[in-house]
Each structure stands twice: as C-alpha cells, then as structure tokens.
Amino acid sequence: MDTHVIEVEKREATGKGAARKMRAAGRIPGILYGHKEAPVSVSLDPKVLERHLTHSGKRRNTLFELAGLDRKVLALTKDLQADPVKRDLLHIDFFEVREGDRVVVEVPMVYSGRPEGVVKGGKLEGTRRTLRLDCSPLDIPTDIKLEITKMQIGDTIRVKDLSLPAGVTAAEDGHLTVATIKAPRAADAAGEGEGAKA
C-alpha cells in the first residue's frame, strides 16, 4: 500500500480573511469530507503536500494518511485549487476512503513504441490521455502502459483489449477505442507516389 502520511491541523476559523492569514503563515486551508462523517476543516503545509503529490507520481490519485486528527484517516484528493499564474497550491478537498471501498479514478495512458503501421505510412489515431478505472484506493496504478510497436495499418485496440492490474477494471465502455492505425489518405498516397517518380 503506497500511502503518504501528511500532518494536518483542525481549524475553527473559516472564510476568505482566515484563509488569507493562513496562507500568509505558510499554510493552506482544506476540507475533509468524511466517510459518513461531518466535513472537517483542516490546514496543512502546501510545500509538504506538493512534495507528496510529486513524489507519488500519481498527483490527484495519491493516497494520504492524514495525521493529527482524532482517528486514522485515509483520503484521496477530491479537488485541488492552485493559483492560475504562480501555480501555488491554494486549497485542497479530501474525501475519506476505507480499505474495502471501490473508487473511480482517472489515470494517465502511456503509449510505448512507434507502430509498424505508422512506419509504413499509416496514421496513429484515437489515443487517449487518461482512462477511468474502478479499483480499491489501495491499488490505484500510476498509469496504464500500452505497447503499440506491433500495430499494423487497420489495427485497433479497444478498452476491452487492455491488460489491467489485478483487481482493477475499466470504468469505460469496453468498445471505446484507445488506439487505431488508419491507412494513409488517397491524396497523401498519391503525393508520395508522385514524389517517388520525380
């Protein structure tokens, strides 16, 4: 279980004025939405938070153990706000999860290799940046890797064709395309032929 422990403090004061004072003191506000519990207002160090988000490689899918509360809490990021210019973290919402829960998360798709069909003139289309998965919060993968080197012109890989980690299922239509190699357009092929003759 890849869990990142982060210290939080309960906070009583709320509102924009309190948030400004908190940020001036080097902390940011946050809210924990509990597992059938009332929401809890917290504060935490944004630099420590950013370090955990970066180190995990999962960003919003990082599983946190929130220390400093009156009970053990596992939580994922519900919402993360950052300054649009400076990109400094301004606010975070957590939602509590339990080890037996199932969650739906978005993870990056990583394509590996140059398809043989592209080498022969085809065009790679239909690629997706992310894929929605249904899994335990303890088993969220960093990404889904897809080897596409052997793909030929006309080949299509759909969600149902993906090899996912144990305990992880796709929360997408199984017939959704994640990669396809299209034949070159007639105009492109004709242009290549004229170029070859010249």
Image (cartoon, grey):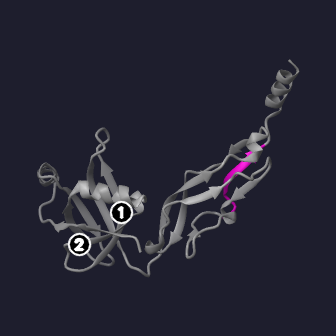
> Which one is in front, 159 or 47?
47
Based on the picture, tell me whether residue 179 belongs to the magenta stretch: yes
The C terminus lies in quadrant: top right
Q: Is residue 189 above or below residue 63?
A: above
The N terminus lies in quadrant: bottom left
Based on the picture, tell me whether residue 173 belongs to the magenta stretch: no
Q: Point out residue 49 in the picture as x, y percentages from the top left corner.
A: 28, 58
- Disc 2, disc 1: CB below 8 Å? no
> Which one is in front, 111 or 80?
111
Q: Point out residue 140 in the picture as x, y percentages from the top left corner.
A: 47, 68
> Which badge, 2 or 1, comes first in the chain's sequence?
2
| Residue drawn at the location 14% of the way across and 65% of the way down | 11
| Residue drawn at the location 30% of the way across and 56% of the way down | 51
Q: Is residue 31 above or below residue 186?
A: below
Judging from the image, what secondary structure is the residue with disc 2 in?
Answer: strand
| Residue drawn at the location 26% of the way across and 71% of the way down | 66
Q: Is residue 107 left or right of residue 185?
A: left
- Label drawn at residue 68: none
Judging from the image, what secondary structure is the residue with disc 1 in?
Answer: strand
Q: Residue furthest right?
A: 197
Question: Few, some or many C-alpha atoms within 10 Å of disc 2 (few <14, some 14-19, many ≥20)?
Answer: some
> Which one is in front, 160 or 49?
49
Q: Point out residue 56 in the picture as x, y percentages from the top left corner.
A: 39, 61
Please provide the residue range marked out in magenta.
174-182
State whether the magenta stretch is mostly helix, strand or loop.
Answer: strand
Residue position marked by numbered label 1 in the rendering: 77
- For residue 163, what is the image quadrant? bottom right
Q: Is residue 137 left or right of residue 28?
A: right
Residue position marked by numbered label 2 in the rendering: 67
